[in-house]
Every structure is written in structure tokens, then in C-alpha cells.
């Protein structure tokens, strides 16, 4: 398998962390890809020109990160990161969606502040995304104590989201007023999947 990725993408990081947690990282070739460049071969694999994309041995491409993570989780016989059924499945998928949405908002802020021409930037848009991030963080602060130390797809995605906030400084220090979430984040860095996937420029 081949994974189209970027060191700075929290979505690609989620996939790479999932691969490590599933014991599949040695079966994936990492192909660094600039999605903004829309390279011809990449666009043929993912017409959206977005990373990550997982290219199977058959040549079929899977995207985006929730689909790829569920596929990887289906390939191993160990403890599943995404429960097959029941309330816990929906709880994990909702937590994943919340953390992915937090990242979406942080990426929107970065694009507005660094890519859009200064005279076309919309402060109201940045304020809206910042408010969404802070609301999501407040929910995570309330819920983190119920995760029970289990590192399933929800907490994996949260780890990527918080790491991205630290990396891009999309908002003021997210730890302020959120001691439980901050403590949880500090304790998970002993996991190889977290350490080995830290974002770099």
C-alpha cells in the first residue's frame, strides 16, 4: 500500500497513527505529496487533490482519513480501534468527527491568515472558526475523563487535533482552563504512534 501524506497534515497523521496502532506501518510506503501542487499522478488517484489518500495494491484509492482509518482497522485481528457495533461505535465516530471538525476550523484559520491576500481576509470568518475550536475544546475537557485510558479512533483524532493546535498556533493556548485535557495530552506522548508522528515543517 502507498500513503500520500504531508508531515504537516493532521489528517495524514491520524492515518499514520492508526497504521502504527494496528501494526501495519511496515506495510505502507509513505509518499510525500504536495496537495496544493495538484501533481498529475496524484489528481488521477484523488480527484479532490487532498491528502491523505491510500493507494491499494490494486491501484484503487481510498480517501479521506475516516475511510482510510476504518479500512486499516479492518486489516488486523487485534483490538479494534473502531468498535463494530453498539453505542461505543457511535461514541467513537462522533468524537472523531468532533476532533476532525476542530482541525477543519484550525486549517480554515491558517488559510485565511497565511494564504488569502491580506486585503481579502475576513475577520468574522476567523472569529467564527475560533469560536468553534473553543467550543469543541470545552466539550473535550468535559468528556476526557470518560475515555478510560483506551486509545481508540476518537482519542487518536483528538491527539492529532491538539498536536495541530500546538504546531500551527491557530488559537491562544488551548490548555488554559482545560486542565484535564491538558493532562491527558501530556500522558499520551509515551505511545510510539504519538511520538513518531509529530508534525514537522
Image (cartoon, grey):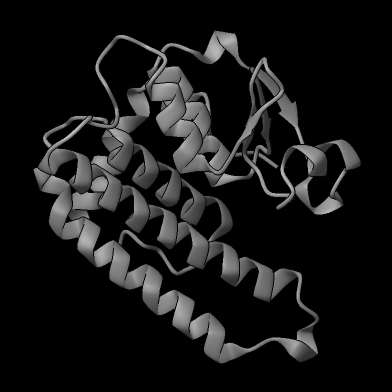
At horizontal 58% and vertical 62% (from top left) the residue drawn is 107
Q: Nearer the viewer, residue 55 or 134?
A: 55
At horizontal 80% and vertical 81% (from top left) the residue drawn is 117
Count of marks overlaid on the render = 0
Left or right placement of residue 194 versus residue 190 in this view: right
At horizontal 15% and vertical 53% (from top left) the residue drawn is 143
Quarter assignment of residue 183: top left
Left or right placement of residue 21 versus residue 12 in this view: left
- The quarter of the rendered structure image containing the N terminus is top right
Q: Is residue 170 visible?
A: no
Residue 81 position, x and y percent, is 29, 27
Quarter assignment of residue 146: top left
Residue 97 position, x and y percent, is 36, 54
Left or right placement of residue 58 versus residue 11 in this view: right
Quarter assignment of residue 3: top right
Q: Nearer the viewer, residue 13 or 4?
A: 4
Examine the rendered structure and indicate whether residue 47 appears above or below residue 78: below
Examine the rendered structure and indicate whether residue 114 appears above or below residue 87: below
- The quarter of the rendered structure image containing the C terminus is top right
Q: Nearer the viewer, residue 182 or 134?
A: 134
Amino acid at each position: 500500500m502507498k500513503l500520500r501524506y504531508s508531515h504537516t497534515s493532521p489528517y495524514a497523521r491520524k492515518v499514520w497513527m492508526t497504521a502504527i496502532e494496528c501494526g501495519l506501518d511496515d506495510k505502507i510506503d509513505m509518499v510525500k505529496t504536495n496537495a496544493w501542487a495538484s501533481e498529475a499522478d496524484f489528481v488521477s488517484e484523488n480527484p479532490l487533490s487532498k491528502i491523505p489518500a491510500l493507494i491499494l495494491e490494486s491501484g484503487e484509492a481510498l480517501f479521506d482519513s475516516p475511510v482510510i482509518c476504518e479500512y486499516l482497522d479492518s486489516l488486523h485481528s487485534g483490538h479494534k480501534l473502531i468498535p463494530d457495533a453498539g453505542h461505543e461505535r457511535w461514541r467513537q465516530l462522533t468524537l472523531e468527527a468532533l476532533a476532525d471538525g476542530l482541525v477543519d476550523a484550525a486549517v480554515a484559520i491558517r488559510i485565511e491568515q497565511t494564504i488569502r491576500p491580506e486585503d481579502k481576509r475576513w475577520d468574522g470568518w476567523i472569529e467564527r472558526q475560533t469560536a468553534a475550536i473553543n467550543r469543541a475544546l470545552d466539550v473535550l475537557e468535559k468528556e476526557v475523563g470518560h475515555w478510560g485510558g483506551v486509545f481508540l479512533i476518537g482519542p487518536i483524532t483528538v491527539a492529532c487535533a491538539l498536536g495541530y493546535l500546538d504546531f500551527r498556533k491557530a488559537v491562544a493556548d488551548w490548555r488554559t482552563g482545560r486542565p484535564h485535557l491538558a493532562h491527558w495530552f501530556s500522558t499520551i506522548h509515551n505511545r510510539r504512534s504519538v511520538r513518531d508522528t509529530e508534525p514537522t515543517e
